Image (cartoon, rainbow, N blue to C red):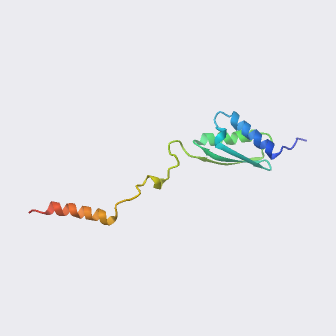
Amino acid sequence: MPRVRTDEEIQQDVLDELDWDPEVEVTDVGVTVHDGVVTLTGTVDSFLKKWAAERAALRVEGVRAVVNHIEVVPRGLGGRTRTSRVPSRWPSRRTRRSRMTGSRSASRRVG
């Protein structure tokens, strides 16, 4: 009968496996274990690294399942959201209309 491994032993072995894997930075991944189910958290810059972390966890003896909650944020985006690229103050509709009207009136004056 195989020896039942504790969650702490599995967690340490998963961390060691992540540290050994050249595709994954162990500092980017958090590992928790409950009843042999490993949950991975953290942020990496590619899906390849996310999947490599999952494969590393699955290589550990005693792991029953892996829940992969690692977030992928491609390098260069820096966590910017769509709204963070929009200028903080757009001209109001009234300002745009008055600019358009003002330039048309000036061009129509014949003098």
Residue drawn at 56 percent across, 46 percent down = 73
Q: Is residue 50 left or right of residue 38?
A: left
- Label count reads 0
How far from the left and from the top, in percent, is residue 56? 71, 39
How far from the left and from the top, in percent, is residue 29? 66, 43
Q: Is residue 72 left or right of residue 109?
A: right
Task: Answer above or below: position of 36 versus 99.
Answer: above
Quarter location, residue 1: top right
Residue drawn at 21 percent across, 63 percent down = 102
Point out the image quarter for the C terminus.
bottom left
How far from the left and from the top, in percent, is residue 84? 46, 53
Instruction: Work out which residue is located at the far right of the displayed protein and give it.
Output: 1
Front in this rendered view, residue 81 or 46: 81
Quarter location, residue 109: bottom left
Residue drawn at 72 percent across, 40 percent down = 15
Instruction: Work out which residue is located at the far bottom of the displayed protein and give it.
Output: 94
Task: Answer above or below: position of 93 versus 31.
Answer: below
Quarter location, residue 19: top right
How far from the left and from the top, in percent, is residue 79? 53, 49
